[in-house]
Image (cartoon, rainbow, N blue to C red):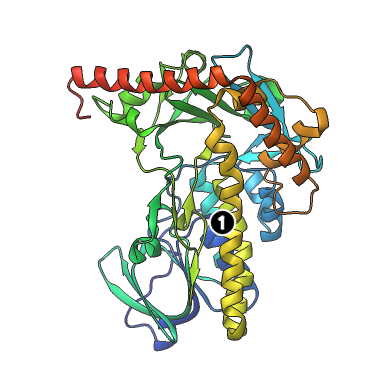
């Protein structure tokens, strides 16, 4: 597939006045934006979808969850995605404080009917979804950036700019912000804030010739804990492996040289991962980003909603990004229709949407905030299905949190077991906390001594 400029329409001032208007304008052609554009266009809505870049374009976040697959089926693209994907049957965890690695498989989850997920190159995956939106009747424009949104009692006027610098105003009844980490509306409203409980930074790149797990497990994602955070290891179908480190912010301050070398030096701090990459080569420039986790104080208002990363981004240790984005689009489509067709019910619909947007990040964040603690590592590295707790954990890791699967009593029990485990090992928890502070201090002191701008 190639959505080149020859087939990608542009909006020009010479177009007829009707083309300046639409019912719904979606900002961002990633998974959230393309999904909601597809759903609304299929329901007969006049939808415009704007993508600031040209597909295919690079994006991180290549690992999907099993409950992504029903969403892909509803969009009609599951087979198209699977043809480009690496099959993922589970998750491998590696901890330097424990023995051999542990693999958890999705087929052991509470609901056994979703035993796999996909690893995807986001450039290909996002292009499939964008093209599907266009086939479904969306007016989709690439190389077109939304730069300002002005709301009024008729909806909004969205000012856009294309790659040639041409500005165009669109009159729309409703705005969907799916701009991802650009967080257009959250920035415009000044309601974006760092996550105070889990601020983090990341550095990542693509490698060839990484050593993968054997057999059926080849496509599994691997998680490696190390002193400054954790690594992901995501095998892709074309032989490339995505490697990234999510670290506490102090660690990125210790960087002395280029980003590529810093990533390689960081990998060297995790012997288990370094061994898997002994024959590997970095094939694309590495990327570093700070302020990794954030959220807006609200996800909706009169005439707009925010989807996916445009509203919040949480630590990706459980690969929730694309799933939460697409799930928010399915929820958002119903919300947009209610707002357009039943204005008297719009406020209540937006309130329900806001609660739904808070639900997923809050649920996963409870695990994320604790994933580096000794108690949580123990539970992951010594899994037990007593009281069906392993099935419950795997249901959460699979994304089975929006259906009526009866796991919630067990989720509360899992949390109780975690707290009891932590209490029983309180000394280890305190020691781990002190060690983290010492490691941070030593890393910063060493960086200062070597001239890093910390």
Observer-nearest residue: 101 or 314? 314
Question: Horizontal placement of 404 versus 102: left or right?
Answer: right
Residue that mark 1 sits on: 358
Residue 303 in view (yes/no): yes
Q: Hey, which quadrant is residue 228 in on the image?
A: top left
Q: Is residue 108 visible?
A: no
Under circle 1, the secondary element is helix
Q: Is residue 254 above or below residue 1?
A: above
Q: Position of residue 236 (x, y in %)?
A: 56, 34
**Residue 260 x/y as whole percent:** 32, 27
- Vertical arrangement, residue 347 with respect to residue 207, above or below: below
User: Who is closer to the viewer here, 17 or 90?
Assistant: 90
Q: Residue placed at 42% from the left, 61% from the top?
A: 51
Instruction: Decide: few, some or many residues near mark 1? Use Cα within 10 Å; few <14, some 14-19, many ≥20.
Output: some
66 to 278, vertically: above or below: below
Quarter that holds the C terminus: top left
Left or right side of 334 for 130: left
Q: Within the image, what quadrant is residue 327 found in?
A: bottom right
Residue drawn at (36%, 26%) of the image: 263
Where does the image place residue 436, in percent across and percent down from the top left? 42, 22
């Amino acid at each position: 597939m190639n959505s080149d400029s020859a087939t990608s329409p542009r909006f020009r001032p010479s177009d007829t006045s009707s083309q300046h208007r639409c019912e719904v304008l979606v900002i961002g052609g990633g998974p959230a934006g393309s999904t909601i554009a597809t759903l609304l266009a299929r329901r007969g809505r006049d939808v415009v979808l704007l993508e600031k870049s040209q597909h295919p374009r690079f994006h991180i976040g290549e690992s999907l969850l099993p409950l992504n697959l029903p969403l892909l089926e509803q969009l009609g693209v599951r087979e198209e995605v699977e043809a480009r994907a690496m099959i993922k049957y589970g998750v491998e965890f590696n901890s330097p404080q424990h023995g051999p690695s542990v693999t958890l498989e999705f087929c052991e989850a509470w609901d056994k009917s979703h035993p796999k997920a996909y690893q995807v190159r986001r450039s290909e995956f996002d292009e499939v979804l964008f093209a599907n939106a266009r086939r479904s009747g969306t007016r989709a424009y690439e190389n077109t950036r939304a730069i300002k949104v002005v709301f009024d009692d008729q909806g909004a006027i969205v000012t856009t700019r294309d790659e040639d610098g041409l500005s165009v105003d669109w009159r729309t009844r409703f705005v969907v912000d799916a701009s991802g980490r650009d967080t257009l509306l959250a920035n415009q409203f000044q309601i974006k804030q760092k996550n105070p409980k889990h601020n983090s930074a990341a550095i990542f790149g693509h490698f060839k010739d990484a050593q993968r797990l054997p057999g059926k497990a080849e496509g599994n994602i691997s998680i490696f804990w190390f002193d400054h955070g954790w690594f992901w290891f995501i095998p892709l179908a074309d032989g490339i492996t995505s490697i990234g480190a999510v670290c506490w912010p102090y660690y990125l301050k210790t960087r002395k040289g280029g980003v590529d070398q810093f990533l390689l030096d960081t990998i060297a701090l995790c012997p288990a991962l370094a061994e898997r990459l002994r024959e590997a080569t970095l094939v694309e420039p590495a990327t570093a980003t700070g302020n990794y986790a954030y959220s807006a104080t609200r996800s909706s208002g009169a005439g707009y909603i925010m989807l996916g990363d445009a509203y919040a981004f949480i630590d990706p240790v459980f690969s929730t990004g694309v799933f939460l984005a697409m799930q928010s689009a399915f929820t958002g489509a119903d919300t947009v229709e209610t707002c357009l067709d039943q204005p008297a019910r719009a406020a209540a619909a937006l309130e329900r949407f806001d609660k739904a947007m808070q639900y997923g990040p809050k649920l996963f964040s409870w695990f994320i905030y604790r994933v580096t603690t000794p108690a949580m590592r123990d539970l992951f590295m010594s899994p037990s299905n007593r009281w069906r707790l392993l099935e419950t954990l795997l249901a959460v890791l699979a994304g089975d949190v929006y259906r009526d699967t009866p796991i919630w009593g067990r989720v509360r029990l899992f949390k109780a077991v975690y707290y009891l485990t932590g209490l029983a090992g309180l000394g280890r928890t305190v020691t781990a906390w002190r060690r983290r502070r010492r490691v941070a201090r030593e890393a910063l002191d060493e960086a200062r001594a070597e001239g890093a701008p910390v």
